[in-house]
Amino acid sequence: MRRTFPVATLLFGLAVFSSHGADDARPLNFANDIVPILTKGGCNSGGCHGKASGQNGFRLSLLGFEPKEDFEHIVKEARGRRLFPAAPEQSLLLTKGTAQVPHGGGKKLDPKSEEYGDLIRWIRQGMPYGNPDDPTLARIEVQPAKETLPLKAKRQLKVVAHYTDGSTRDVTRRALYEANEKAMAETNESGLVELMDMPGDVAVMVRYQGKVATFRATIPLGAPVKDLPPVKNFIDEQVIAKLKTIGMPPSPVCDDATFLRRVTLDIAGRLPTPEEMKEFLASKEPTKRDVWIDRLLDSPDYAEYFANKWSALLRNKRTQDWYARGSYLFHDWLRDRLMENLPYDEFVRQVVAASGDLDQHPPVAWYRQVKDAKTQMEDVAQLFLGTRMQCAQCHHHPFEKWSQQDYFGFAAFFSTVNRKASGLPGEEVIYHKRGTAQMVNERSKEPVKPTNLGAATLELRPEEDPRHKLADWMSRPDNPFFAHTLVNRYWKHFFNRGLVEPEDDMRETNPPVNPELLTALATAFVKSGYDMKELIRTITRSSTYQLSATPNECNVRDRQNFSRYYPKRLNAEVLFDAVHEMLGASPQFEGQPVGARAVALPDNSYNTTNYFLTVFGRPDSSSACECERTQEASLAQSLHLLNAKDIQEDLVRDQSRPAQLAADARPDDDKLTELYHLAFSREPTQGELQLGLAHIDKKSRGKANEEAMKARREAYEDIVWALMNTKEFLFNH
């Protein structure tokens, strides 16, 4: 029986054929040709038909990663009502997409577009899925891959798809584009990149049919780079080379007072004492900065501060009262291992492959919060490998190469972890259960054996604990994730900006701002034997770390080239300790000795009873993500510092620092100088001294005896309160 078509349809088909040329004769493949159209239009995104429940009765696989399912939904579901082969342009799929009939997603297709024409052709060809031997997409290539462009330039990208049969196709119009720094570049749907007026490096992620590629643009400022800081190590070599490339002169090296406060806060999590400040500033030794760094790294303060960091990342969480013993033991283990400088690879092994009970091996406490193999794998991947695997559980990772097979193969390393009661409430014994290590792929229903990311499947004996094999692979010198992730995480700690940002999302489509520096740091870290103290020493001894935070006219907008130090707000625990040091108060935490530092608290339980820690963003240890710690300023924080009841009570009590200073017989300028030493680790300027003296005089003028003493005390309370609310006090700079 001969098929007939309306005249309008026939004419449209002829027009499409003439515009596309001979390629129109090519049979269309649903996965290769149709799914990318749906993805480009956002039809299969998580906010539309790609979400788990679909949208208005129509469901697609997220981002088109399951084309066979999509074919069933479009062609066969609902009695095929979405397609009308007799008059393709009347198909519901097209009338909805072009908004000829009401469509919640609005207009997604232009009837004059190539995409619309291909949909018409596909329907006219009989809606084929394609043949089993049709070529599949092997990779995509973006042209150019890297280029140096001037400020405000425009660059049209070209995306070429490479197929398994060796053929190629220009898919520029159907690829998706996204810049990693929105303030530096914008992209349109056809691949035109428009740069802003901010120098540096910007990457554009290109995605097509589950494959990704990246275009990188270097945008020079072009200013002369001179008066460079001294080169202390390879960090300075790489940073200065980058600054010369983009033409951005750095700020000068900071003064001794600024360095002392900065590095003490960053390594020890505390303010320098006035005595330490005087000793450091008085020293004429040329190596005094290096000596002070070593002194901090050898101090218990360093171990306490970084144990606080790792305790949150490793979910040392007390959700029940009887968890206290475990959280204390785990925190103490972290502090002691950091103090003794246990190599990082062994540190990670002792956590990931922990076995026994809490008394034998406290890191088994980690398994109390990560209960199943999937959660254990996801935390290990994100925390130690900088790879977020969560998406790959249900579908192919949208921005990476990891599939569900990769997800369950990696999770299989934890498939033999078992637990039994230890005899103490809330505590368990963790052990390896002999047997075949494997997970079942939830989509294919097939078993998957332990497989390292991007590596071959392992064949293990039943008695072998797969977690030790995982630790072996992670600590290999050629592992592309392990060392890179740790050095990037620590770089973020000291610079308030990772070489890769976020610090635990390291993937091809999120490249580092200085790849050469990241590689050099990782290489040096491996060569040092995974020495964490040596890594900190290397970072903080560099001139790059010691640059001033004060910008020059060229680097005022720089946020990725490390041409200056980027100020950061003191985190919740450090600020709490600094405020109480200024107040002369000794806080009391339940179960802790009087005056215990907030940075030394073992777990999250203190957040609920201390509003200061909560409002300033102390993490609740609920995830392996650094993002749980809030660094953003808020109105609630400002109000708390200004008029919180507990701070006001500590400020006006008889044993407070203001009360002691008011009763001190020393000259007022000496006492004001002491406050500046404590708060800012520097000498006050003459103007600051005069302002403080004038305020004391104004308060006490015309008063005598007890009334004068009370007025002087109030004046010191005002001054301490004012100093604590300055940006110079609240930020590490």
Image (cartoon, rainbow, N blue to C red):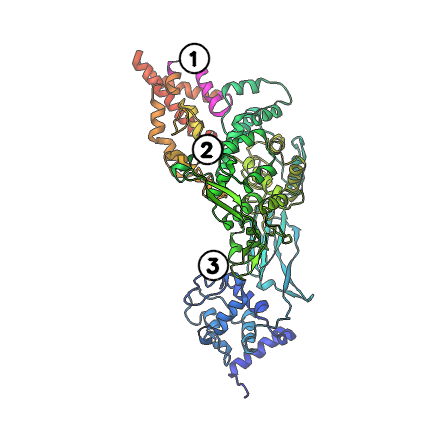
The answer to whether residue 224 shows anywhere in this view is no
Q: Please give the residue where the numbered disc 1 appears in the rendered image.
A: 667
The rendered magenta stretch, by its main secondary structure, is classed as helix
Give the vertical position of 200 relative to 547 (above or below).
Answer: below
The answer to whether residue 3 shows anywhere in this view is yes
Residue 390 position in % (x across, y down): 51, 52
Q: Does the CB distance between marks 2 and 3 fall below 8 Å?
A: no
Q: 577 left or right of 711?
A: right
N-terminal-most mark, 2 or 3: 3
Q: Residues within 10 Å of mark 2 (few under 14, many from 20)?
A: some
Q: 476 left or right of 104?
A: right
Stretch of the chain drawn in magenta: 662-685
Q: Which mark is residue 378?
A: none
Q: Nearer the viewer, mark 2 or mark 1?
A: 2
Q: Nearer the viewer, mark 3 or mark 1?
A: 3
For the point 46% across and 64% down, which residue is it? 49
Q: Please give the residue where the numbered disc 3 appears in the rendered image.
A: 46
**Which amino acid, mark 3?**
Gly
Residue 75 position in % (x across, y down): 50, 73
Q: Secondary structure at mark 2?
A: helix
